[in-house]
Amino acid sequence: MPKSDLPNGEPQTIGGFLFDYIHKKGVRHAFGLPGDFALPTFAWLERSKIECVTMTHEPSVGFAADAYARVNGLGLACVTYCVGGLNMLNSIAGAYAERSPVIVISGGPSAKDREGDPLLHHKVKTFDTQRRIYAEVTCANTILLDPRTAAAEIARVVDAVIEHCRPGYIEVPYDVVGEPIVPFDPVQTARRVTDQESLREAIAECTEMINQAKKPVILAGVELHRFKLTDIALAVAEKFNIPIAATLLSKSVIRENHPLYIGVYSGALSEPPCREYVDQSDCVIMLGTFITDMFLGMNTAQLSRSSSILATSEQTRVRFHRYDGVVFGDFLNALKEAKLKKRGKFDNPNPVSESVPLKKDELHDPLRSADVFRILSLHIDDNSVVVTDVGDSLFGAIGLRTGKRNEFIAAAYYCSMGLAVPGTIGVCMADPTKRVFGIVGDGAFQMTGMELSTAAQLGIGPVILLLNNDGYGTQRFILDGKFNDIRMWDYVKVCDVIRAGEPDVVETKGQLDGALRKAVSSNKISLIEVRLDRLDRSQPLKTLTDEMAKLRNPATRTPPPGKSSGKKTAAKK
Amino acid sequence: MPKSDLPNGEPQTIGGFLFDYIHKKGVRHAFGLPGDFALPTFAWLERSKIECVTMTHEPSVGFAADAYARVNGLGLACVTYCVGGLNMLNSIAGAYAERSPVIVISGGPSAKDREGDPLLHHKVKTFDTQRRIYAEVTCANTILLDPRTAAAEIARVVDAVIEHCRPGYIEVPYDVVGEPIVPFDPVQTARRVTDQESLREAIAECTEMINQAKKPVILAGVELHRFKLTDIALAVAEKFNIPIAATLLSKSVIRENHPLYIGVYSGALSEPPCREYVDQSDCVIMLGTFITDMFLGMNTAQLSRSSSILATSEQTRVRFHRYDGVVFGDFLNALKEAKLKKRGKFDNPNPVSESVPLKKDELHDPLRSADVFRILSLHIDDNSVVVTDVGDSLFGAIGLRTGKRNEFIAAAYYCSMGLAVPGTIGVCMADPTKRVFGIVGDGAFQMTGMELSTAAQLGIGPVILLLNNDGYGTQRFILDGKFNDIRMWDYVKVCDVIRAGEPDVVETKGQLDGALRKAVSSNKISLIEVRLDRLDRSQPLKTLTDEMAKLRNPATRTPPPGKSSGKKTAAKK
């Protein structure tokens, strides 16, 4: 087989090319868990310029790579065949749903192994099972069975991941990684080209609609971040003085002390001034926004299609019609140049307020969920990233605003539990200059919290706020039963197990403030168990769970069969 | 909608019918983890006669239900939509590969939710994504979108699970569980009927082949256990005095002190007398055996197709040809009645030896992997079940034989890590009279070991032997690198975290013996950390990893790129 001559003049193997190609696209760290079919691939990874972080469990591999990708722009997860890949599926499904560009590399059996379809360990139904499954949660997939096409296939999948901001799947038979690469002619993927006539008509219609509106508002969606288009959208807002809200999934895409920024919109879950402004708007301009049930606050949002514009990477809609062939970035640029009228000075109904330090007389108050976010905001600065799990960790954070730019990462649409702890590891590796906070409930901590072991191994120091409300708190308010009960762990003893970390248990406002002060002055892992009442919840979570209870616990139709497990206060051992 | 009149005279809901139907098939416990789309289903489960065990993480839900199914004959796993179901996929894939009859019930969005294909939380690509994925790892699947067909669909999937001994998938939209059931006429599934002429010819040919053989041997496969056909196979062996071996996957299907039993056959991994007997046999009768690479000892087995008979639920093969239309059970019954000649007294080359208690002068010897199984055998009795994870936990157990009947559960074909700890919970619930031992490596313990929390919650007392060899030991011998290193936990401190269990750390033979003696006299969880040298391995694992290194670490082709992480002794803090 001919050896290739790559720019650096060295002949390369497929394994070498694979990681070199991904490294050149900006990946500096991989998250992985090896297995026998993947060992040769891991060996080539270890030789490459990419540092590999071995995690303890595959669900965490996917979460860490996802969080890394959100900060870095591209992530990499390496696992073994089926027993590894299938165990990571949920995390990658979440990355697909929320457009996080993660490359999945899995080991696999050789072409020869597959002949005659024998029963090889790790095989489920057919040798193609894992690829078929991953096709459901990725934008491109390949099995490198033919060394002659391997390089082109690698480039095709990696480029698709970057273009679509969705995961892609590359299965590497164990015997091909050492094969010499065959040179290929890089084909520039045909980029989508905007239909200029459609664009002109769309912009003309939007211009008229926005100019006639008394109260237009921009909803800045997560695709602005994913496709690096935030600056253009913000320029539109600033040029014409149009206020701007974010969604939970895109929270922090706009710096939260921007004078035009009015908060996170999520229907009835929003802060009231933000909700009122958006619901009363006569022209809602949604840019890169996912119209999800969570964004709509479980359908409490009052958005009328007759007064909205929606532009995303997938569609351009004005009121009830659609313009085909309009590329999102082109639309934004044209909107910036459109003849929109400049509005007068904006009187922000929901400006960021300065964080109020704790008063002396409240130091001994028992903590409530809402306090946690207020106190956390005292310790967040320009350099902070907050990674939240679902539950009150996420919804309570709607009101978390600081006067400074910060980053916020959450599975705010897919809503899988378990992202926060492994996610902090991904963020720490993507940007070691950041102070990373993870906020996680006790239920989610029991799923992936032990991943702090990997943080210890790496010598990084995330601050973990473990909101302990004794069970699946969110669900208690929707429909309760014994199934929402979990065992009360002595959570901070996890530090003894992993032989690292600085534990703290807090029950009052003053204790949390003190623990956070200590945590941000340390470079070690801080694990702060925040004991909350079992029936405590933030206002947004109350709104959400009340709405969900109407759907899931229709007492009129289904007699509520839950034998509620009592209303004990949590966290008393 | 009409209400049904079921045998008990009560009108029933779909939720009531679902769990009633499954309960009548013999399921007494479900393993689950609730989520909002599944809450109404969990509420009906809690009302039913089935006890629900809430686990900490979905991978464990699947493993516990799988182990339960292997002991009980049918198991049940309940999860929520996508974020739950996709997180359990690997465990269910293993149940598929190894024929474990697990019913998967997932919550799901309502029919109305799905109209217009909106973005609902937990959705990945389409509303059908999870069902399509589960179709790859189940024998039957359904979404109960139409209440009118729900009862028939439930019966169809549950019956298929029982018939095929493979997992099945039932997705329950949250709004249908409270709907009244619509009666259906149970359709007796058309059972496969044997083609009697084919059977006669097959038996005639087998009879001649076996009678002409000097040294026939039966390989008792796992399907004998799954389809409850062990007694017939054993009757064949006893009636004609034909020796019988098992496979790792079917270990303990035949009681291991049976005079005809010669051990676990797995090519070069076998105990030498067993390997020699099978490899020299001139007629190998494989009954319900999966021909896997693990069974073949990574292709070190010397089985000739020209002298073998293979009968399974899927095919009947003699030498190089196949008889279609022969049902496995009918073949076995006919073989029992065939005119096989009765052999003379069998001189067992590998009889079970009495366990030898530890001698005084070896009490202080450092432990090696092989000793663990010898010492464990001193504490195993008729009432014991051993659940092993992969690695030396599994392969080292090849030589674990006792004079008593015992049960052995392992992912010996699919070889996923993580089964042992949640698996012990499944077994304890399936048969509370058993003393259950879990054997798990440190790598697998870091994945699912915290599930001991659930054992504590249930008040059950499995004995966990945690074989700590400081990392992914099996893989070190195949291809080593930093990626095989994991953090050294202070494992027994897990008891402090879960606030239960009796910890022990052992480094000598005497210490292990003492710890096991204490463990079997206790009803509480015992967590025994067994400290092994990092480079220790049993003889079967040595054979296996040497073979795998030839495949995965072809130094001739791929220069071994691993920077070995040194040869420190494990478990020294």
Image (spheres, coloured by chain):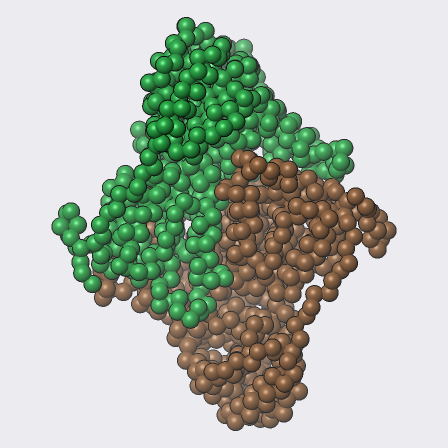
Chain colours: A brown, B green
- Please say if A272 is above or below A392: below
Quadrant of res B100 = top left
Q: Residue at x 47, y 48 (%)?
A: B136
Mark yes or no: residue B389 visible.
no
- Please say if A136 is above or below A305: above
Extreme left residue here? Answer: B9
Mark yes or no: residue A314 visible.
yes
Residue B248 appears at what percent x and percent y? Answer: 48, 26
Q: Residue at x 79, y 43 (%)?
A: A1
Q: Residue at x 38, y 62 (%)?
A: B109
- Please say if B489 is above or below B109: above
Residue A431 appears at what percent x and percent y? Answer: 67, 59
Residue A111 appears at what percent x and percent y? Answer: 64, 41
Q: Nearer the viewer, residue A198 or B205?
A: B205
Q: Nearer the viewer, residue B7 or B397?
A: B7
Extreme front residue here? Answer: B197
Residue B36 appears at what percent x and percent y? Answer: 37, 59
